[in-house]
Image (cartoon, rainbow, N blue to C red):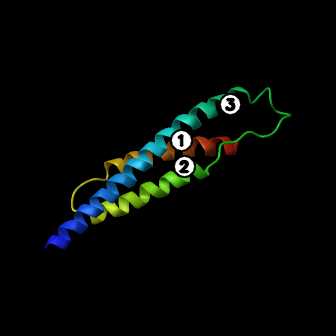
Amino acid sequence: MRMERFVDRTVWCLALVLGQASALWGMMITLGWAIGFVLIISSKGRMESMMQLRLSTVPPLIGLTVAGLALIVAQKSRTSISQYAMAGLVFNAIGLALALVLLSR
């Protein structure tokens, strides 16, 4: 009985930490990618002959992976702790969408 409670508490804490890490990572990526997106789009006409400017897709994919892992761990917990993981998924998906829009141009 005591070991089961310890495992439940550990799973809950792990889901919380992974979800919060993903949400914070996603907020930083979304803010940075939004600023970069605006700067790249606004300078697109002036810099045609210069190098191709793009946003990397790897950081949002890392955040999506951490958020997915947090969701999987949160399912093992008996309490609902998945809201942080969902916020991480949303923020990282926005950053990935901005990067993919620039790749298509």
Using the rendered view, name the quadrant where residue 11 is placed: bottom left
Residue at position x 24%, y 54% from top? 80
Mark 3 — residue? Answer: 41
Residue at position x 48%, y 45% from top? 25
Total residue callouts? 3
Q: Is residue 103 left or right of residue 72?
A: right
The one nearer the camera, 60 or 25, is 25
Residue at position x 86%, y 34% from top? 49
Using the rendered view, name the quadrant where residue 10 is placed: bottom left
User: Tag 1: Cα neighbours inside 10 Å, few (<14), some, or many (≥20)?
Assistant: many
The quarter of the image holding the N terminus is bottom left
* Disc 1 element: helix
Q: Is residue 7 left or right of residue 45?
A: left
Is 101 situated above or below 85? above
Between marks 2 and 3, how big is the CA–CA gap? 20 Å
Residue kind at label 1, given as amino acid type: Ile
Mark 2 — residue? Answer: 60
Residue at position x 38%, y 48% from top? 20
* Disc 2 element: helix
Pointers 1 and 2 in contact (C-beta within 8 Å) = yes
* Disc 3 element: helix
Is 11 situated above or below 29? below
User: Tag 3: Cα neighbours inside 10 Å, few (<14), some, or many (≥20)?
Assistant: few
Q: Is residue 91 visible?
A: no
In the rendered structure, which disc, 2 or 3, sits on the residue that comes first in sequence? 3
Q: Position of residue 55 (x, y in %)?
A: 65, 42
The quarter of the image holding the C terminus is top right
Mark 1 — residue? Answer: 29
Residue kind at label 3, given as amino acid type: Ile
